[in-house]
Every structure is written in structure tokens, then in C-alpha cells.
């Protein structure tokens, strides 16, 4: 008796995707259980086919790190009703890479990261796992945006963040975006009626004056705890820090090309290369 041929099962992502709605990948750096990512999913879930691939634990401050020295784990979860979601043992950037290669088997139409608990304005964009996930997507020609709410509390009110995250995504979907578009969106911790709207900004020159506090553990051994004071040295009224202080949602177009072009030209002349 001949054994009938069995067809290879199609992944759920391939089966569900249709041409009338975009595929939207959502990730974060606070972990798949964080309130921020749940609020982001809720704010845009009717705008496309949503897939969530996020870290299985907090990964704040990981920047653009990737996992190369240990295996990555990817587990299907049920954190979001009616939405395919996966918890990844790696970094936010790992999540984007694995989502494209092993979950979607294609590039999504948009990648959204957040909503982060805490600011990612000014220099924070360099350290942020939230923004690095968005930047990784842009490197792969996937238009993206990272969202952050200026409230670190686990009980933060995401009402305004949800409204403005949706507004930004709707604007992105109506705009012919460049191949490497990545937006850094920060939302003041204010009630919606107190927010004055969106402000397209540049990144402020502002950073932390840092120091390490030395302490002793119960065994008498030294350890160090990073502390610092945020200092804004940029008094421009076109920056993200100014916009947020004046109750605007800041939107900064970010690029991953770190070349300092004007200084490059100066060096080429002065060094006579």
C-alpha cells in the first residue's frame, strides 16, 4: 500500500497574510510582559497583521547588541489574544533578526518598537534597546519607529502614548517612506488634552554627567552602581528635549550612518589625502 505524500505545513504567518493589510512587527526592550508593548499592540492591532517578537526578559540599555556566544531560544506565547507572539531569549536586535528569518519568513512592511518605559531622547538613543531594534529594521529596509513614554513607572498611564503611537503609525502608512526610515518618538507623561501635538525635531546635545557610587556587598567586597545627572547643554528650540519640556510629542528622524560628513571634508583638506 502506497503511503500518501504529506504536504509541508505552512507557517501561520504565511497562511494569514493578505495583500489588503500591511504586516507589522512589534518588539521592545522591556520584555514581552511589559505594559508598554501591550499598549502599543492595542493601539495599532486593527491597522495590519500584527506579529510580536520580543525579549523574554528586560533588555534595557542593550543598545545594538546581538547574541553570538550562546544559543537563542524562541517560544510561542499567548500574551496577546488573537495575535501571534513569540518570546526570545536574546536582545531586541536579535528579536528583529529572528522575526524576519524564522517567524515571518519575509520582511514586514513596518516595524514598531516600544512603548518604552522612560525617555529615549537625546543621547539615550545610542544606548536604547528600543531604538536599536527599530534601527536594525531600518538597516534591513523596513521602515520603523521606536516609541517611548517619559514615565518609568510600571503603573504609567499610557492613554496619550497610545493615541500618538497610532497617529504616527497612520501617518507612516499614508506616506511614501524612504527605504531606511526610522523615527524616534517620545511622548510626555501628560494627559492627552495637555499635549500640544507632534513636533518634528532634531536630537538635542544632552547627556548624563555620570559617576559610579562604590558600595560594599554583605561579604565586604566592593561593587559599583552607575548614577548620573541629566544635563541639557543644547538650548535650541528645535530639539526633542525642548519639545518634550513644552508638552509636544517629539519625532526625530534617525540615521544609522554615523559619518560626520562636514568634518570628513575638513580632514580630507587639512590632511591632504
Image: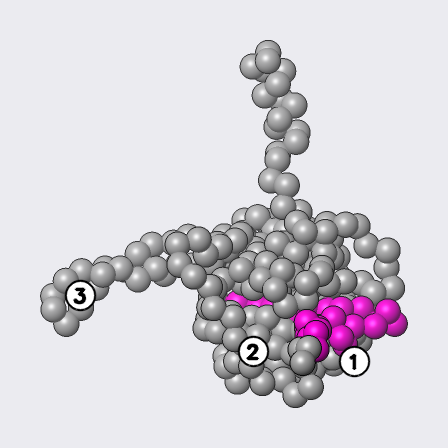
Residue at image point 61% right, 81% down: 38
User: Compared to 128, does 37 lie above or below?
Assistant: below
> Would you say residue 115 is visible in this rendering?
no
Among the 4 quarters of the image, the one containing residue 192? bottom right
Q: Residue at x 45, y 73 (%)?
A: 57
Spatial CA distance of label 3 from label 2 is: 41 Å
Residue, far top = 272
Q: Could you give the CA–CA distance between mark 2 and mark 1, rounded to whole angstroms?
A: 21 Å
Q: Mark 2 or mark 1: which is in front?
A: 2
> Which residue carries the number 2 mark?
76
Residue 216, numbered circle = 3
State which tag comes first along the sequence, 3 or 1: 1
Q: Which residues are magenta?
A: 4-30
Q: In which quadrant will I find the N terminus?
A: bottom right
List the residue tagged with mark 1: 46
Crowd band around label 3 with a 10 angstrom C-alpha radius: few (<14), some (14–19), many (20+): few
Amino acid at each position: 500500500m502506497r503511503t500518501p505524500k504529506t504536504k509541508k505545513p505552512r507557517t501561520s504567518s504565511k497562511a494569514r497574510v493578505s495583500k489588503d493589510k500591511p504586516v507589522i512587527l512589534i518588539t521592545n526592550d522591556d520584555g514581552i510582559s511589559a505594559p508598554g508593548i501591550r499598549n502599543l499592540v492595542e493601539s495599532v492591532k486593527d491597522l495590519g497583521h500584527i506579529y510580536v517578537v520580543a525579549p523574554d526578559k528586560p533588555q534595557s540599555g542593550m543598545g545594538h547588541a546581538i547574541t553570538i556566544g550562546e544559543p537563542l531560544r524562541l517560544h510561542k506565547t499567548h500574551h496577546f489574544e488573537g495575535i501571534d507572539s513569540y518570546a526570545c531569549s536574546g536582545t531586541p536586535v536579535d528579536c528583529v533578526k529572528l522575526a524576519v528569518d524564522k517567524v515571518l519568513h519575509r520582511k514586514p512592511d513596518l516595524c514598531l518598537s516600544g512603548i518604552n518605559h522612560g525617555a529615549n531622547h537625546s543621547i539615550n538613543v545610542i544606548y536604547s534597546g528600543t531604538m536599536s531594534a527599530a534601527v536594525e529594521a531600518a538597516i534591513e529596509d523596513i521602515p520603523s519607529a521606536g516609541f517611548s513614554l517619559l514615565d518609568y513607572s510600571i503603573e504609567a498611564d499610557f492613554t496619550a502614548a497610545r493615541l500618538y503611537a497610532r497617529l504616527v503609525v497612520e501617518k507612516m502608512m499614508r506616506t511614501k517612506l524612504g527605504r531606511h526610515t526610522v523615527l524616534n518618538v517620545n511622548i510626555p507623561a501628560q494627559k492627552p488634552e495637555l499635549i500640544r501635538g507632534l513636533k518634528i525635531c532634531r536630537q538635542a546635545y544632552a547627556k548624563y554627567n555620570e559617576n559610579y557610587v562604590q558600595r560594599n556587598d554583605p561579604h565586604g567586597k566592593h561593587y559599583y552602581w552607575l548614577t548620573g545627572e541629566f544635563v541639557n547643554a543644547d538650548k535650541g528650540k528645535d530639539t526633542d528635549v525642548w519639545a518634550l519640556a513644552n508638552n509636544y510629542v517629539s519625532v526625530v528622524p534617525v540615521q544609522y550612518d554615523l559619518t560626520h560628513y562636514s568634518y570628513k571634508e575638513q580632514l580630507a583638506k587639512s590632511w591632504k589625502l
